[in-house]
Each structure stands twice: as C-alpha cells, then as structure tokens.
Image: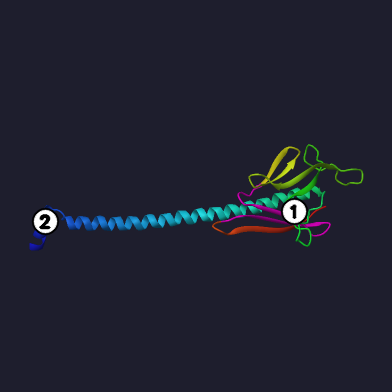
Amino acid sequence: MHFLTRRIEAFHRGVTLIELLFVCGFFAMVLTMFLVLMGRTVTSQQQLDRVTTAAVNLEVGRLKLTELLGRSRLVAPVFAPVVPPTPGPGPSNRLTLTLFAVDTTGEPLLDALGQPQLGNTVDVELDANNNLVYTDGAQNHLLAPLGGNALFEVERLSLSRIRVRLEVDGHEKTRRSLVFEAAVP
C-alpha cells in the first residue's frame, strides 16, 4: 500500500524539469535521425529515378530509331569528316535517310518491281535540347528525349550495317550508353 501511495503522490506532484528536458532531448534525437534517414531515402529515390529515366530513354531511342531504319533507305555516307591527326573517318552525329512513301493506311507504296517507292529525305540528329529527332523538311519529329549532355553517333560498318551509339547522363558522374547495330536496306 505504501508503494501505491507514493505513486499517487508522484502523479500529483508532476514531472521535474530534468525529466522534461531528458524527454525533449530524446525526442529531438529520434526526430533528427528520422529526418536524416528520410533525406537519404529521397536522394536515393531521385538517383534511381534519373537512372531509370536514362535507361528508358535510351531504349525508346533504340526502338524508334530501329523502326525508322526499317521504313527507310540510307542515303548519304555516315562518316564524319577526317580531322587531323585522326587516321580515318570517325563516327558521325547525323544520319540521312530516305523514307519509303506510304499510302493513307501507312502501308509502303510499291513500284512495278515490288520495291518500295522512295519519299522524303530526313536527317536524324540531336536537336538543341538534346532530343533525338528526325527532321522532315522544317518539321522535327521526336524519337526520344535524351536530355542534357546526350551523345548520338553513327558509324557505317558495311554497305548494309551501321553501329549506333546513344549516351546520356545517368546519376552523379556515371553515363549510361547503349550501342547497337542495325541493318539498313
């Protein structure tokens, strides 16, 4: 009974300043740890978003460029001009294609020999905003939004094959790149 009486007296007496400061300090420490962990989580999520966006943009660029190559014919050589002291032609940052002419349903128009008829000539390159586009006359058509510090290079391997290199910023100082080969008619 004596113990119960002391508890009731302590309850009526309240808390001391030392106890209150201890609880406030402990709460501040827990809150600080929580905020630090939340900050790290948000930073990690932002880095993951940048990496995922970069990877998706590279893959979209590859798929759309491959689809464009399938409905066009390579026109001009894809070699950059030789710049001394480079021993040979290097990759180009522009690809010139002639699209196949299509009817209203999107099917290619064929000539008497069953070959696709040629239509407009387009240039595939990076625009001022580092988006991979093809220019049809004065109109740009978006293939993929690559973003800042993007790189687009094309190198001819043979008469019917080219190698394409797309590169974008991932996170921090890491760059993501995608290199693929494609057949051109």
Name the one closer to the observer, 33 or 89: 89
As shown in the figure, which amino acid type bears the numbered disc 1?
Answer: Ser
Question: Could you tell me residue 42's position as x and y percent?
Answer: 46, 53
At x 18%, y 58%, the residue is: 18
Task: Say what secondary structure mark 1 lies in.
Answer: loop
Task: Name which of mark 2 and mark 1 comes first in the sequence.
Answer: 2
Q: Is residue 93 left or right of residue 38?
A: right
**Distance between the Cα atoms at labels 2 and 1?**
86 Å
Name the one closer to the observer, 27 or 137: 137
At x 7%, y 62%, the residue is: 2
* Residue identifier under label 2: 8
Task: Point out the stretch of residues depicted in magenta.
Answer: 144-170
Q: Furthest residue to the front?
A: 84
Residue 176 versus residue 95 in the image, above or below: below
Name the image quarter holding residue 11. Answer: bottom left
Quadrant containing the N terminus is bottom left
At x 82%, y 59%, the residue is: 158
Q: Is residue 38 left or right of residue 114?
A: left
Task: Say what secondary structure mark 2 lies in.
Answer: helix
Question: Could you tell me residue 163's position as x and y percent?
Answer: 75, 58
Name the image quarter holding residue 103. Answer: top right
* Residue identifier under label 1: 92
Q: Nearer the viewer, mark 2 or mark 1?
A: 1
